[in-house]
Every structure is written in C-alpha cells, then in structure tokens.
Amino acid sequence: MSDSAAPERAIVIGAGLGGLASAMRLGAKGYAVTVIDRLDRPGGRGSSITQGGHRFDLGPTIVTVPQGLRDLWAACGRDFDSDVTLKPMDPFYEIRWPDGAHFTARQDDAAMEAEITRLSPGDLPGYRKFLDDAEDRYWFGYENLGRRAMHELWELIKVLPRFAWLRADRSVYAHAARRVRDPRLRFALSFHPLFIGGDPFRVTSMYILVSHLEKAFGVHYAMGGVQAIATAMANVIRDQGGHVKMGVEVDEILVENGRASGVRLIGGETLHADLVVSNADAGHTYTRLLRNRPRRRWTNAKLDRARWSMGLFVWYFGTRGTRGMWADVGHHTILVGPRYQAHIRDIFINGHLAEDMSLYVHRPSVTDPSVAPEGDDTFYVLSPVPHLGHDNGVDWAEQAEPYRQKMLAMLEERLLPGLAARVSESLVFTPEDFRDRYLSPLGAGFSIEPRILQSAWFRPHNISEELPGLYLAGAGTHPGAGLPGVIGTAEVLGTLVPDAAPVAPMKMAAE
C-alpha cells in the first residue's frame, strides 16, 4: 500500500493543561498528535502526588469558567460533564484578617452586598460600581482580546483607544481604591492577580474582570481535583488516536528548511512532525529548546530583562483524625498578614523573604473525601515568595524548614489550633522545585508577570515569532496564566493552526 494515507503529525511538548487542550484541538483538526512530558502523569502544574493515602493537587484548585472546558470538549465531539464532575463552591472562600475581621465571598448578590454592608456600609455604592467596571473589562478583555490571536501589531493598535477608555494603565489595586475606602475591602477586591502571578499594585486594572468571572460563572471544584480534568483530557487525546508519552523529556526543537520539523529527546531519539506546539514555559522554549537557533525578539538578554511572576512556597500536608475538627474552616481560606502593599513590594520588587506572610489555605477533604484516608484531612497551604532571580536570593536549602515552621505557627494561632500534633504527611515545594520539576525560569510560579507591557501583543505569541511551524501554549503566552487562561491559549491556537490535510484513500500498489 502507498503511504499517502498518513495524517499530518503534530508534537506537543508538555502535558500541562494548555498542552493537553492544544492536543485535543489539534486532534479535532485531524492531526496525529503525540504529547511528550517529563513527569509521571499528565497535568503539569495541575498534576498531583499521592503520599500516605493523601492526594495532593499540586497547582490550581478551582475552576472559574467551566464553559471554556465545555467548549473544548464540544470541539472534540465530547461532553465534558460526562467525563468530569464539577461541584459549585458556596461560599467561594473566606478572608480572615489579623484583627479577627472576616469576609465571605459568595455568588449570590444579596449575600455579597450583606457582607459589604457589614464591613463598611458606606462602600456599597462603590462596590456596585466596581462590579460594573469588572463586567465592562470582562467583555473587552476576556471575551474579546482573550479569545483571539494577538500576534499582529495591528490587532493591538486597533484596541488602544478602548484600553485608554478603560484606564488599563491604572493598577488593579488603584482601581479598587477609587471605588471603596475600607482597606479590607480594597484587599478583597484586588488580591486576585496573585493567582495568576501578578503584583496587584502594578498589574493592569483589566484584571478586575476576575470579580465578574466569579459572579457570572461561580467557583467550582473538580471531584478528583484538577488532576481528574488532566486525566480526562489525556483520555480524549488517546480516543482521538493520539499518544501521551510520560517520563520523556524534550531536549531540542528540530529545524528543517527553516521550519520546526520535530524534536530531539534527552537520550538522542528524534521524532518528526509537521508542526510543534510547546507548552513548556516560553522562557525555557526559547533559551533551551531553541538554543542553537538565532532569535530576533526573544533573545536571552530580552528574557533576562523581563519581569517574572513571584515564586511560591507550598506546604502540602495530611492530618490524622481531623475530619470533624476545625468546623469553621471550609474549602478555601485566605489568611491575610499584617501588611499588604509593603509585603507585596518585598516579594516582587525587593526580593526579600519577609518575616510575615499571607496564606491561601486549601482544604479539599471537606468537599472531596477521596483526597484523604477516612477521617483524615488533606491540606495545601501557599505563600507567595520572591522568585530565584533577585540579587539577594533566598537559600531555600537553609530557609525551607524555618519558613514551614513559621507557616505552621501562623496556622495554629489563627486557623487550625493543635495542628502540629495532627500532621501525618508532609511535602514542601519551594521556587527551586518549580524550577527543577516544571523547568520554570527563576522558579517563577506563573511564568512572565502579566503587566500591561507583558500582556497581549507584548507577550510571547501563540504563533512563534522565531520559527515557522512552532506554536506556543500555556501560561507564558497569550492570554496568560490561570486555568481559564491556559485553556484559552489552546482556543487561540486552534484559530491559527490550519486543519490537517484530508487523508487520501489508501491505494494498493500496482502489481
């Protein structure tokens, strides 16, 4: 038989959520897809580790725009809700301040306005205006810019007047401060950029759209964790006829006739393809995977000058016999430290590991008992810290355990009394683990920081500026980090990659 029946081939580097979503869309376009990842299971930063009967979801914990996933599945002729079970969160999360004040975020308008009124009655009109502002930015920033390619300069030029009208030059915090006066509400309305690696005092106010996302779509938890979503994605790829190769690392992107032509693996094996998608961090893609090719825009020097997102210190732990304890501690809690702006400056600008901290506490076992042995709890506690690129960088070999002990003390004092005696399993990730496990430059938690001059056209493009036939997906490209963002990178990529050529009927060779 002739080989004219072979479909066009695509290789996706990295089985993170953006890479898996890209592979699904390529499979739906008729490509024979191979996904390659160095970890032992799909999901990238959304994967998990099981230890002592506890499943620790390592990265994202919530789903804020389920429709993005449903659209992705539908593009593949599948039903997302048949593969993954989402459970709405109510409340979304609780914020607790050192003075005992608290704020509970919910989807219901009346409940949210009651919380605003309880904390600061005079700020209710400003809060309503803030939500209107968030909706305006949602329609422009998410539904418009976020769902289409921004690799052509003209696309940026066309929207500059709208950027100016919406005051995109103003920071998220500055916008919140114009609408409400209470410092606690200013925090509650401005901290969200931290979940995509941004400094609330410097990231463009376009990102207040997250408040509308929460209100419009709610906050959901995937039963089985985000790992369940990643596993379901890999299953769709296999059902399409694709391959997901785990425990294999790409060393270099191959170039032939001026185009991406495949990859070379660690160990020397080569795999050929008609196009390559890199879900590796954009910095790693350009400085490592294209190290032997001259680059015009994303040179090492330019990437060295970029502002990278902060690092993360994450303590994953299990507790024994605590399922009925700490009844006032729900699925998501944010413990605010004594400082806000000064602490953020220490993290992003000074690169200083401060004595104080603010914590995001995830307790999935109150929703999903499968994460822990019966009667026990599983926790994930995150603290933003400086990335590894600051001049006064932190020696995590020395500081990891003292920092964990400070975290433990804060948790015992303000949220989980008696915790130390109950800890049964423990696992710590520092920025060094993000660098080594995920090949993240400087150990940054969310790739390049989403400042205004590092967003949209200014971000590494979905269609590579450096090499024809190479495409980018994931947090380091447009539209950016966060689960909706990385799923969105695959949606944009789907508009850029042409459908695979129809497969010609196989013919018997002439006798």
Image: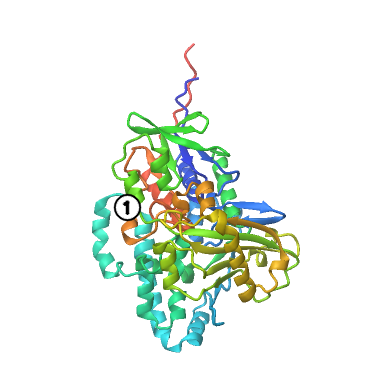
Coloring scheme used = rainbow
Image x and y of residue 67, in percent: 49, 60
> Residue at position x 32%, y 52% from top?
150
Can residue 80 be seen here? The reply is no
- Where 454 falls versus 76 (above or below)? below
Q: Residues within 10 Å of mark 1 (few under 14, many from 20)?
A: many
> Residue at position x 38%, y 37% from top?
291
Q: How many marks?
A: 1
Instruction: Work out which residue is located at the far bottom of the displayed protein and give it.
Output: 122
- Where 378 falls versus 489 (above or below)? below
Image x and y of residue 286, in percent: 38, 42
Image x and y of residue 453, in percent: 31, 58
Q: Quadrant of residue 465?
A: top left
* Residue picked out by circle 1: 150
Nearest the viewer among 449 and 216 is 449
Of the residues shown, which amino acid type is indicated by label 1?
Met
Nearest the viewer among 171 and 299 is 299
- Where 441 falls versus 68 (above or below)? above
- Where 18 falls versus 399 (above or below)? above
Residue 262 horizontal side relative to residue 464, left or right: right
> Residue at position x 43%, y 85% from top?
124
Secondary structure type for disc 1: loop
Nearest the viewer among 8 and 285 is 285
> Residue at position x 47%, y 40% from top?
12
Can residue 181 be seen here? The reply is yes
Image x and y of residue 307, in percent: 37, 56
